Image (cartoon, rainbow, N blue to C red):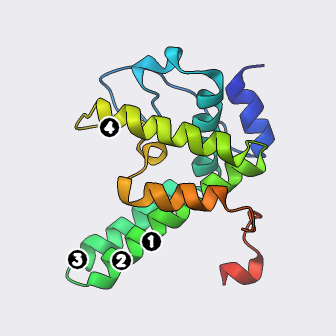
Amino acid sequence: MSILQKLVLASGSPRRIELLQQAGIEPDRVLPADVDEWPRERLEVVLAHEIAHISRADWLVQTAAEICKAIYWFNPLFWVACARLRYESERACDDAVMNMGVTSHVYATELLELARSFGRHRQAWLPAPAMAARPSNLERRVRAMLNARLDRGPITRGGRW
């Protein structure tokens, strides 16, 4: 069984997920060309994070939010709400990865290494942008990962309302 299949089973995702690895084309999910050089732990946390996005259907929510922002571009509250939605989406996926058994310090270390490597190899288009993290949110995400007092369980029905 492949790493991807194990992670999909562990996440409980009902969706069929395929792994694409190629350079130059932007399909749905693409890993960087140097993924074969990554340590196994890094590959596992990146895949687990992206599987969490797929399981949560974040692409649909983010797309709807961006459409609303485009329609109401003149309203700064939509800009703030979209930024907050992206951040909370990343945090929820971080929590999902740690709930799959990845320790917080290992996950934070891999996230920082990815941010460093993407910083060294700046491109107009970066694969797996969610995992790379914007520098403004990186510190907040790492602090949240290392905060042992946070509840990392899924949101309750009441919390959704």
Q: Which residue is tagged 3?
A: 73
Please report whichever mark, 1 or 3, sits nearer to the chain's N-terminal start.
Answer: 3
* Residue 79 drawn at (x, y percent): 31, 75
Circles 4 and 3: CB atoms closer than 8 Å? no
User: Does 10 sit left or right of 74 as displayed?
Assistant: right
Q: Examine the rendered structure and indicate whether residue 72 appears above or below residue 134.
A: below
Which one is in front in this view, the residue at disc 2 or the one at disc 4?
A: 4
Q: Mark 4 sits on what residue? A: 119
Real-space CA distance between mark 4 and mark 1, rounded to the nearest whole angstrom: 23 Å
Which residue is tagged 1?
A: 84
Q: How crowded is mark 4: few (under 14 residues within 10 Å), some or many (20 or more)?
A: few
The residue that mark 2 highlights is: 80
Label 4 sits on a secondary structure element that is: helix
- Farthest-out residue, top: 36
Picture quadrant of residue 102 = top right
At label 2, which amino acid type do we have? Answer: Val
Q: How crowded is mark 2: few (under 14 residues within 10 Å), some or many (20 or more)?
A: few
Q: Which three-letter amino acid code belongs to the residue tagged 1?
A: Arg
